[in-house]
Amino acid sequence: MFKKMKGTYDILPTEVAKWQKLEKVIRNVSKIYNYKEIRTPIFEKSELFHRGVGEDTDIVSKETYDFIDRGKRANTLRPEGTAGVVRSYIENKLYTSNVPVQKMYYVGNMFRYERPQKGRYRQFSQFGAEAFGSNSPQLDAEIIAYAVSILKALKIKDVNVHINSIGDAESKKNYKEALLTYLAPDIDKLCSDCQVRYTKNPLRILDCKIDAENPILQKAPKPLDYLTETAKIHFVKTCNYLTAMGINYTVDTSLVRGLDYYTHTVFEVKANLDTLGAQNTICGGGRYNNLVKSLEGPDTPGVGFAFGLERLMFALESINFTGDPDYLHLYMMILGEDQKEDGLQLVNRCRLGGLYTDLDFLDKGMKGKWKQAANLKARFVAIFGEEEQKNGTINIKDQETGKEETIKKTQLYNYVVAELMKPSSNCEGCSTESCDECEDV
Ligand code: AMP
């Protein structure tokens, strides 16, 4: 028997409703913030990620799925979404649009060769957003507000926004020098990867997974102390705008995040839920003012975030998040071989009209058919046998009320629709959005 690859998982039809509902919420909130969906390829030129994400990051140096295609091109399965969106923004010249601030989001699979554990997979899904074309701290604050709104819409309450600034290029340079000086006497006490990072890209040392708890790193200088005046103003304004929008946040001076392209604001959203375990960061993002230029585009600032959807799903487990219920409007029982053509015509008519309709394909006996109708949660069951065919009628039973009637077969569709429109017996006729009974109609 074939088994799925390590670090991958199936979403079975019984679970897919939850994912669809999650995506629905994402799309609704994105619309509210006026972010438009973009879909980019799952693989890109390897070089895009090497340059975009950074050669020395764990993602690129250890985790990419690389392959040479039959045309001898070097391809990489995308490990994150930003580089592809930036590539598309540049290639399609979206910076020439009459909407100068381009706000986009994506939902899709990413691939990283990581050690699988709860909340960490080799194929996983991210929902991410990117906004290009403005350096305003309003946009930093908006993107954080957007991330928080997603969690609010999903009714995840206990969340913390951690925010920091690593500043502009000059701040990053000053900080880097201070960090190198500080680490110089102790570098041999850090892991072998960090010793390489020390010469190649010292900022990466700060988010080393191995040395995370090392006191040497915990006492290291903080980026906030090396911000230029401009970077300081940017950060203070971002914080003030968050406060103005009623968003609570914690300034986390050691937050840097693992990707090279960040400048100014970096942030993470954590959820305090038992179901998440150690992997409680469900969203990470920040500003990347140099990325578009470094990928051969015009000098355009950007800011974005990415949510890990699996972790979001774990978070949702603890609040009993469910998808829309699965049910049929109509289950059709065609009783004999000679009734199949007429019966299928009736099924077809109901489906054309939009009724969720199914039927028995296994020529089961009546007992089996009734069991199927119940398993499929059919509201109505229609029975079409020899006698009904002769009389031009159909027998229909409402599984909710037990009401049974014989109607003209041509009336089947209208009958079911009319019955579905009636308020259900469980509904108090409120027609509010929160009423499942009304919503179903
Ligand atoms: P990153 O692109 O590394 O900033 O990650 C953004 C978000 O994606 C994280 O906060 C996680 O929620 C999620 N994520 C990253 N790597 C994985 C993985 N291997 N498996 C599942 N989720 C992941």
Image (tube, rainbow, N blue to C red):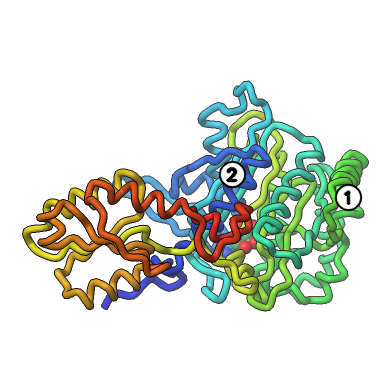
Q: Nearer the viewer, residue 334 or 188?
A: 334
Which disc, if any, is residue 105?
2
Number of numbered markers: 2
Q: In this view, does 276 lie above or below 149?
A: below
SS for dot 1: helix
SS for dot 2: strand
Residue drawn 60% across and 31% down? 297
Image-quarter location of ligand 1: bottom right
Q: Which of 89 and 371 is in front in this view?
A: 371
Three-letter code for the amino acid on which mark 2 is drawn: Tyr
Q: Quadrant of residue 191?
A: bottom right
Image quadrant holding the N terminus, namely bottom left
Sort mark 1 into few (<14), some (14-19) or many (20+) by Cα contacts within 10 Å.
few
Q: Is residue 117 above or below residue 357?
A: below
Q: Which of 117 and 297 is in front in this view?
A: 117
Q: Mark 1 points at which residue?
A: 243
